[in-house]
Image (cartoon, rainbow, N blue to C red):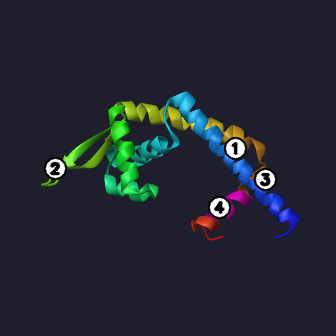
Amino acid sequence: MSDADWAFWDSWMRAQRRMEREVDRALQQDFDISKSEFGILVTLRAAPGGAMRVTELAESLGWEKGRVAHLLTRMEARGFLEREEAGAAGRRTGITLTAVGAERVDRAVLGHGRVIRRLVLDRLAPDQVQAISAWSRAMTGDGSE
């Protein structure tokens, strides 16, 4: 890679780290939730009836089941969700978003959107947004580009 390529890469990575820090900070300070908790709440909010099985949640987030289980215990204690027993063994496999969790995620989504707009969208021209969107879809396999 050329010096210009390395300079691009360095600035790209620094920008990503800054965005991550700002988003994490805003979620913690403004809504008292972590980025991981936000991910769980948003995923449950989008699920039919605000409910999912633990394995479905872990798969949809691309996380290990143990990580999800740890977060669910903490979030259940905070009143954001309820876990339900299912099956003969009485294992807690179902998760349902509570009214407290729904209210928290609804407020956090609005605040999160404001942070994204301020950090990213307000600083880009429409053609830059389109170029980054096309690249992102190509990287994730979500588009024809």
Tag 1 secondary structure: helix
- The residues bearing labels 4 and 1 have C-alpha atoms spaced at a distance of 19 Å
The residue lying toward the viewer, choosing from 60 and 71, is: 71
Image depth: mark 4 or mark 1 in front = 1
Task: Tell me the crowding category of disc 3: few under 14, some 14 to 19, or many 20 or more residues within 10 angstroms, Cα based.
Answer: few
Give the label on residue 90, or none.
2
Tag 2 secondary structure: loop
The disc, 4 or 3, on the residue closer to the chain's N-terminal end is: 3
Residue 123, located in which quarter of the rendered image?
top right
Confirm or deny contact between disc 2 and disc 4 (CB under 8 A): no
Give the label on residue 27, or none.
none
- The residues bearing labels 2 and 1 have C-alpha atoms spaced at a distance of 44 Å
Q: Residue at x 87, y 63 (%)?
A: 4
The disc, 2 or 1, on the residue closer to the chain's N-terminal end is: 1
Magenta stretch in the rendered image: 131-137
Kindly identify which residue carries mark 4: 136
